[in-house]
Amino acid sequence: MALNPYDLYDVRSLLSEEERAVQDTVARFTDERVLPIIGECFDEGRFPTELIPEIAGLGLLGATLPAEYGGSELNYVSYGLICQELERGDSGLRSFASVQSSLCMYPIFAYGTEEQKKRWLPDMAAGKVIGCFGLTEPHGGSDPANMKTHAKRDGDDWVINGSKMWITNGNLADIAIVWAQTDDGIQGFVVEKDFPGFKAQVVKHKMSLRASVTSALFFDGVRVPEANRLPNVKGLKGPLGCLTQARYGITWGPIGAAIACLDEALEYSKERILFGRPVAATQSAQIKMADWARRITAAQLLSLQLGRLKDAGKMQPTQVSLAKWNNCRMAIDIAREARDLLGGAGITTEHSPIRHALNLESVITYEGTETVHQLVVGRELTGINAFGG
């Protein structure tokens, strides 16, 4: 019996019936609703906001959260499969869902009060309230401790000044989860879009994640009530905990992008005739695509085991770093090589590899660059911290 070229080790057989149903549902949505429009959205630099109600309707926002807060109570392997199938469409779609779920809904759930959870989470799960995550600053990048944005207590309020950069969903967002220095360490605040002094500005001239909204956020004396402070965490532990959640999903997403590139290269190479035979009949093409399948298979097994560890409550941040490093590198290399195999046709967005390759330049950079994750693993191995020196 022929093997599935996109699942040579039959990883799908290791999934539960519910996990397979989740994957099939999101795969169908991607095939029917995302793929027909996403190339054009990328060309136009437009995020397909018309898909938000459908994404919410499928229960993909805050999917792992309890039903009382609008969640779908799915396990983390299912959440990973959601990320994989969305990114098979486009990294921008997965980024949207990842930010909403892991970087915005998760901190409210994990660090917020019961009142905050009830106020925001159900509407966020329904796609009625969109969030963004304000941690990265223009000069900060991989060093979030070097944070300049600060919040000062003033009576019953907090006053925030500063700025954030490279913020996904910034100009879509109704609320921003903003991390700021205080006299008592770094703390998180829910900043509402209509608060005076708060402004979001779209980042233009992007060559990556064009079907995604990326923004700069500015805070000029923004007054935030104490009721909007996330009280149950202080220090970098708060935002880094959110990033571990999001990075977990990112380990799955690039698998989808790589599968999309392999799929297109396979079909194209069978149809393209050069020197009297299909490109797929050449040794060089077969060796390339076999190597892609090898790398995809390794990534699938890596993320599945990571998901099982996370669902068992045993996942460690270093394990997430290893998977993000491996899987992003796997996907960007495959996307570039698939673009090459398609020849001249590969440079247009009528085919997906160039779009995925460009998007993955952001995915391999954000939420920890490849170098950062290599050093996290190196620190685990040696017990020596090589950061900052």
Image (spheres, rainbow, N blue to C red):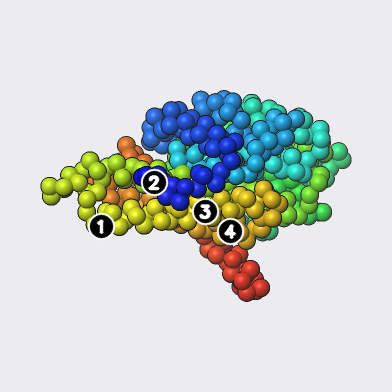
Q: Residue at x 76, y 34 (%)?
A: 117
Q: Residue at x 59, y 69 (%)?
A: 378
Quadrant position of the N terminus in the picture:
top left
Q: How far, Cα to Cα, is label 2 from label 3?
A: 16 Å
Most distant residue in the right direction: 155
Q: Which residue is mark 4?
A: 321
Secondary structure under tag 4 reads helix
Q: Residues within 10 Å of mark 2 (few under 14, many from 20)?
A: few
The mark found on residue 200 in the picture is none
Pointer 2 and pointer 1: residues touching (CB < 8 Å)? Answer: no
Q: Which residue is mark 2?
A: 3
**Which amino acid type is shown beneath numbered disc 2?**
Leu
Secondary structure under tag 1 reads helix
The mark found on residue 284 in the picture is 1
Q: Residues within 10 Å of mark 1 (few under 14, many from 20)?
A: few
Pointer 2 and pointer 3: residues touching (CB < 8 Å)? Answer: no
Is the residue 146 above or below the residue 232 in the image?
below
The mark found on residue 301 in the picture is 3
Eye-nearest disc, 3 or 4: 3
Q: Nearer the viewer, residue 62 or 213?
A: 62
Among numbered discs 2 and 1, the one appearing first in the sequence: 2
Eye-nearest disc, 3 or 1: 3
Q: Residue at x 65, y 41 (%)?
A: 75
Among numbered discs 2 and 3, the one appearing first in the sequence: 2
Q: Residues within 10 Å of mark 4 (few under 14, many from 20)?
A: many
Residue 245 in picture, x, y percent from top left: 64, 48
Q: How far, Cα to Cα, is label 2 from label 4?
A: 30 Å
Residue 77 in picture, x, y percent from top left: 60, 44
Residue 331 in picture, x, y percent from top left: 44, 52
**Which amino acid type is shown beneath numbered disc 3?**
Leu
**Which amino acid type is shown beneath numbered disc 1?**
Ser
